[in-house]
Amino acid sequence: MIAPPETTRTDSLRVSCMGASDVPGDGLGHPRVWLQIDPDVGFVDCGYCDRRFILNGGPADIDHDQAHSAKP
Ligand SMILES: [Zn+2]
């Protein structure tokens, strides 16, 4: 089994990601990047750490633990 990528739910179309921001200096973070969610898709993946940001109420906002099953 491959662990599903970490997901973060957000109310904003524009989000920033710094990787594992709660573990500073542990080598898991990355420079801050800004990501834009496409409203027609409802989510965006961070190119650095593969974290997925899901727009609350968007097309990808489906039942919590089932979100990864929609991945192609
Ligand atoms: Zn990231």
Image: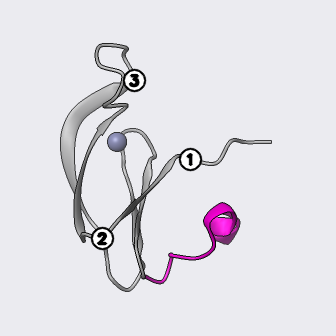
Q: Is residue 71 visible?
A: no
Q: Which residues are magenta?
A: 58-72
Marks 1/2 in contact by CB < 8 Å: the verdict is no
- Tell me the crowding category of disc 3: few under 14, some 14 to 19, or many 20 or more residues within 10 angstroms, Cα based: some
- Of 62 and 2, the residue lying toward us: 62
Amino acid type, mark 3: Leu
Mark 1 to mark 3 CA distance (whole Å): 14 Å
Tell me if 52 is positioned left or right of 68 in this view.
Answer: left
Residue at 64% of width from left, 48% of height from top? Answer: 4
Circle 2: residue type: Asp
On whether residue 61 falls in the magenta region, the answer is: yes
Q: Secondary structure at mark 1?
A: loop
Residue at the (42%, 82%) spot, across then down: 57
Task: Relative to 59, say whether 10 is above or below.
Answer: above
Q: In this figure, which residue is indicated by the disc labeled 1?
A: 5
Distance of mark 1 from mark 2, alpha carbons? Answer: 19 Å
Q: Which residue is mark 3?
A: 28
Mark seen at residue 11: 2
